[in-house]
Image (cartoon, grey):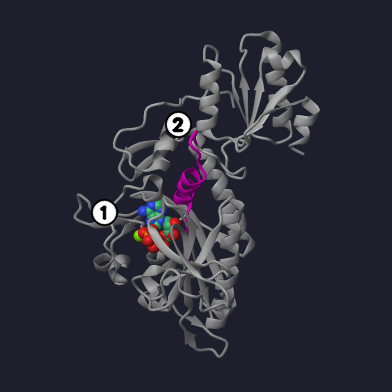
Amino acid sequence: MFQSKLFTKTRREAPKDEVAKNADLLIRAGYIHKEMAGSYSYLPLGKRVLENIERIVRQEMDAIGGQEIRMATLHPSEPWKQTGAWDKVDVVFKINSRTEKEYTVGQSEEEIVTPIAKEYVQSYKDLPVAIYQIGQKYRDELRAKSGIMRGREFTMKDMYSFHETQEDFDLFYATAKDAYLRVYERCGLVAKATEASGGSFTEKLSYEFMVLTDAGEDDILYCDSCSYCANVEITKEAEGDGCTRCPKGKLARAKASEVGNIFDLGTKYPRDFGFTYMNKEGNASTPIMGCFGIGITRLMGVAAEALADEKGIVWPESIAPFRVHILNLSVGDEEADKAARALYDELTAKGVAVLCDDRADVRAGEKFADSDLIGIPHRVVVSKKTISEGKFEYKKRTAGDARMLSTVELLALFN
Ligand code: ATP
Ligand code: MG
């Protein structure tokens, strides 16, 4: 993509009324547009990041047998009344219509997916099944001050699974936990699987996946030597205590952001909807259900905020909107334009996504500042000076110094 054609532009001044660093950076760099607190539009750069995260999540969910669907987001109120959520869950939006019928918009989708599964699962032979979607969620959040990390509208991957036995559920739960850890790792983040409470409808524990960052709204205790980690909400342990899971560990306290969680929902929702199947003995039995969420837009916010430096965003390679940012500092010079275009074409032919700053009348200093703010992992400068040496100036976003590379050396970085 050519930057002269990109309809969004960077801006130097901080957006008004924005206290979250992730939204401040993403707005200034042209990734998102704020509609109101907790509601953002995703612009071309932002949409590319979301799609990269979604692709990773989709691959990992498909790999553990998830089947992707797209559920309605506009719901009748009846199933929400049937499960008790209409009155009990405070973030549920309640929409009046001119026909006096009440609706809601999905804040989670147990109420929709359980009746769908009920319709198709009749026998033990139809189990287990894991159904997921990647879509918009709507919640009447009181505090929406964390930018895209806490939206009133946000994107979530939500998966729901149904099982014959607790053992089968436990097996899938462990598989999903590993898949979750792979998702975060592939997105360039380190997440800890944290023991937490099970939420409104279950006494059981759940796992929350926490990325350590001061931007987070949660407090966790984690062992400095093993993988034990717990939300402070559920533990009586304190900072400095010895770890109960390993001999030499000590517990440390940190701020963290919850980028996903997985729950054992037991049989609540199948019971609410009269969902039974014929078991091996020929009797009607109620399936055990799990739910598995990942905050797609929150993940983007955490990566933008937690990995940034004083100059701007620093995207991990896997989710960056483009991998390479070519800065042509001599636009209008025939040789520079030709060299920039040739490199653009060669990288594109190798499947590398490239943004080329071909804007005329923009000073070099501004191009460098924009490039740092936008945060693409690899920067390549083309100018009369680099051409006179027959090379390109190459720098990684995370590196201090640039080096001069020939075309062959540069292309070899992307084999
Ligand atoms: P939180 O405690 O942060 O409110 P939650 O327990 O309500 O999260 P779930 O209902 O399990 O979260 O949703 C699954 C995932 O969706 C969360 O782990 C989080 O990553 C993301 N998420 C939840 N609420 C929001 C929100 N308001 N904005 C953006 N992402 C969210
Ligand atoms: Mg919540």
Is any atom of residue 73 visible in this view? no
- Element under disc 2: loop
Horizontal side of 128 relative to 258 (left or right) equals right
Task: Place residue 354 in its image quadrant.
Answer: top right
Q: Callout 2 environment at 10 Å: few (<14), some (14 to 19), or many (20+)?
A: many
Ligand 1 under 8 Å from disc 2 Cβ: no
Q: In the image, which disc is placed on residue 142?
A: 1
| Amino acid type, mark 2 | Gly
Quadrant of image for the N terminus: top right
Residue 114 counted in the magenta span: no
Alpha carbon of mark 1 to alpha carbon of mark 2: how far? 27 Å
Ligand 1 picture quarter? bottom left
Residue found 62% across the figure and 34% down from its top: 400
Residue under pointer 2:
30
Q: The disc labelled 1 sits on which kind of residue?
A: Leu
State the residue in front, 188 or 268: 188
Place of residue 322 in the rendered image (x, y in percent of width and height, measured from the top left): 60, 35
Magenta-drawn segment: 292-312
